[in-house]
Amino acid sequence: MAGVLATPVSQAFAQDSGGVSVIRDTEIEEILHQDSDPVFVAAGLNPQSVQIHLISDPQLNAFSTAGEQLFINTGLILETKTPNQLVGVVAHETGHIAGGHVARSGAMGRAALGPMLVGIGLGVLAALAGAPDAAAGLVFSSTYFGEISVLGYSREQESRADQAAATYLEKAGLSGRGLVEFFNNFRYQEVFDDEKKFPFFRDHPLTDDRIEALSTRVEQQAHYGATDTPEAIARHALMKAKLEGFLSGAGQVMADYPPSDTSFPARYARAIALYRQTDTEPALKAIEALITEQPNNPYLWELKGQVLFEAGRAREAEPAHRRSVELKPSAPLLRINLGQTLIAVNDPAKLDEAVAQIRRAMGQEPDNALGWRLLSEAYDAKGDPGLARLAAAEQNFYLGQLLEARTFAVHARELLKRDSPEWRRATDIILASKPTAAQLKELGVTG
């Protein structure tokens, strides 16, 4: 995983600004894709093209936007009782994506969030707690999400998405029962006024007729009796435990996962809760016990590295983060964690590797604003101000802060070799920042 779930920054931002944070966690994203990809394939979509985004929000909600972007609230995941219920909701949203419902309005089309998303390991969020200027999490304004909410689907589109979900689930060899169960669990929402409903049921109107139509359809399908595999159940339990460990208070975690529960997810949740309380040594002891049991689990090594990093023990964190990358070399967020740690070690001899690790990650996720910020720090430490300013321009560009991006790009052009690839990239950022003709003339930018 590219990061452990951490709440300080995301929650602080949400409380201070009324916004919502999109957070990143490789382990959870991997689980969501593992369970959802068969549905995407059944819908004729390329699973690699569907981006699943995790929103740190206790409200029950999920929605999709143009560009095959699927957003799932942590609250919805925690409310689902089985993997089949969660994949049922994913199948429903896939019905909206495949049916073109999300592209029905210009406002929704403009809401394709790709270049605005900040890729951050959840563990990195905690590391940056108290540093809001670091842009540790992308905070969307409540106004933006309000715009999304008023574009609720019509009842006809909801019915079509339900029927499409049933088709995709059957084609994938999965039962549609979970989606019916999910709807039935919240049937009572229909009697509430809109302001009292969960966001999901404000935007996705629920009716008895709709539930009955879906139930009748899935009960007739060949895979209605299919059950979740033990592996899927274990993944779902682990994902929920991890989320709760990071997003709930220690008291709640201990109540839901008491010491008498010796399952792996329970011990994982308690280890995370100890870490979140800054009980460093007990947390490390608990994590070490988990690593002894699963020595090749990259996410346990990542968690150990994060605990050490946040305790100001970067040199001790380095081997743990390095091991996580060795075990999961395809995960860019793990490399970013390692790169950040190498920078924090404050050893000039390690800066080149820090840059190499982060740049390799950026090759996979070029819109990862945190990676660009760390590259800017590394280049500054190396005494390369031109590349440092260019990286800062990239960071602000992918955050959607075009004025700041242009300012850094202008400074970068002044320091970089003219007509070099980096110089031209700085020029591209300036041109993409929508400057006026007068500003271009003043800057002397002609391409």
Image (cartoon, rainbow, N blue to C red):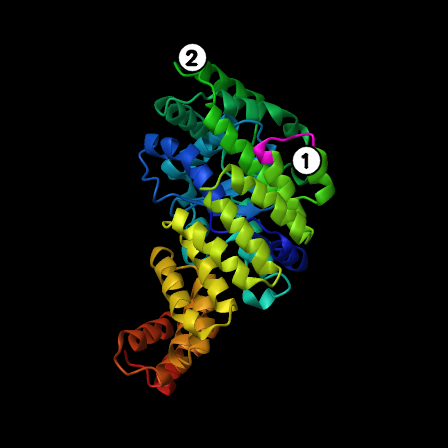
The image shows residue 241, relative to residue 6, as above or below, that is above
Asked whether 245 or 402 is in front, the reply is 245
> Seen from this angle, which residue lies furthest left?
419
Q: Quadrant of the C terminus?
A: bottom left
Determine the residue positioned at 65% across, 38% down: 194
Query: Is disc 2 placed on a helix, strand or loop?
Result: loop
The image shows residue 423, relative to residue 259, as above or below, that is below
Q: For marks 1 and 2, give the one nearer the viewer.
A: 2
Determine the residue positioned at 57% across, 30% down: 80
Asked whether 302 or 359 is in front, the reply is 302
The image shows residue 184, relative to residue 262, as above or below, that is above
User: Does any portion of residue 215 appear in the rendered image?
Assistant: yes
Dot 1 or dot 2: first in sequence order is 1
| Residue 260 lies in the magenta-colored region | yes
Q: Which residues are magenta?
A: 258-265
Q: Tell me where residue 56 appears, x and y as whole percent.
A: 58, 47
Q: Tell me where residue 113 appears, x and y as whole percent.
A: 44, 54
Give the image quarter of residue 35. Answer: top left
> Looking at the rendered structure, which numbered label has been put on residue 220?
2
Q: CA distance from mark 1 to mark 2?
A: 34 Å
> Looking at the rendered structure, which numbered label has been put on residue 126?
none
Q: Tell me where residue 266 appears, x and y as whole percent.
A: 62, 35
| Residue 161 lies in the magenta-colored region | no
> Looking at the rendered structure, which numbered label has been put on residue 193?
1
Name the residue type under label 1. Asp
Indicate left or right for 263 with 233 as reference. Answer: right
Determine the residue positioned at 37% across, 60% down: 362
Indicate left or right for 234 with 394 as reference. Answer: right
Q: Tell me where residue 10 appears, x and y as whole percent.
A: 60, 55
User: Does any portion of residue 399 appear in the rendered image?
Assistant: no
Indicate left or right for 212 with 441 as reference. Answer: right
